[in-house]
Amino acid sequence: MQLIRLAWALTGAAICCFVILLIHSHVLKEGQLAAGTCEIVTLDRDSSQPRRTIARQTARCACKKGQIAGTTRASPACVDARIVRSRQWCDMMPCLEDEGCDLLVNQSGWTCTQPGGRVKTTTVS
């Protein structure tokens, strides 16, 4: 008899844990980001000037302690906050693998230079 009660209690506890897990995963899908991840919220491009495209992007990040929103491999990412404080932008590896990274003279951003010579400049607002 006690064994049956124990089995029912364990079954009830398992169902309760499953329901809590289900609710938690549903809440996470409904607008919350997992820790250490980012998503692009807006992306605007302006090609009105010849040979020049200005792109503005807004990202939303849920960074862990000691991290801050930044850019890695040309995508939004959580990076070490010390990189942003020291303005050593190339330390967060913002360019694609085949591109070279250089700091702007005033450290307000960086450039990514592609093998063909095309340069992409990013400034921090």
Image (cartoon, helix red, strand yellow):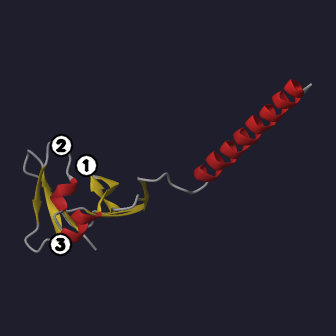
Residue 9 visible in the snapshot: yes
Which residue is under mark 3?
108
Which residue is under mark 1?
73
In front of the other: 118 or 71: 71
In front of the other: 62 or 75: 62
Identified by mark 3, the residue type is Ser
Of the two numbered discs 3 and 1 on the same chain, state the one appearing first in sequence: 1
Of the two numbered discs 3 and 2 on the same chain, state the one appearing first in sequence: 2
Residue 122, image x, y percentages: 21, 64
Give the quarter of the figure containing the C terminus.
bottom left
**Mark 1–mark 2 distance (CA, rounded to whole Å):** 7 Å
Dots 1, 2 in contact, CB < 8 A: yes
Name the residue rendered at 41%, 53% in the picture. Answer: 36
70 over 8 or under it: above or below = below
In front of the other: 82 or 118: 82
Which residue is under mark 2?
97
Give the quarter of the figure containing the N terminus.
top right
Q: Secondary structure at mark 3?
A: loop
Identified by mark 2, the residue type is Glu
Of the two numbered discs 1 and 2 on the same chain, state the one appearing first in sequence: 1
Q: How many marks?
A: 3
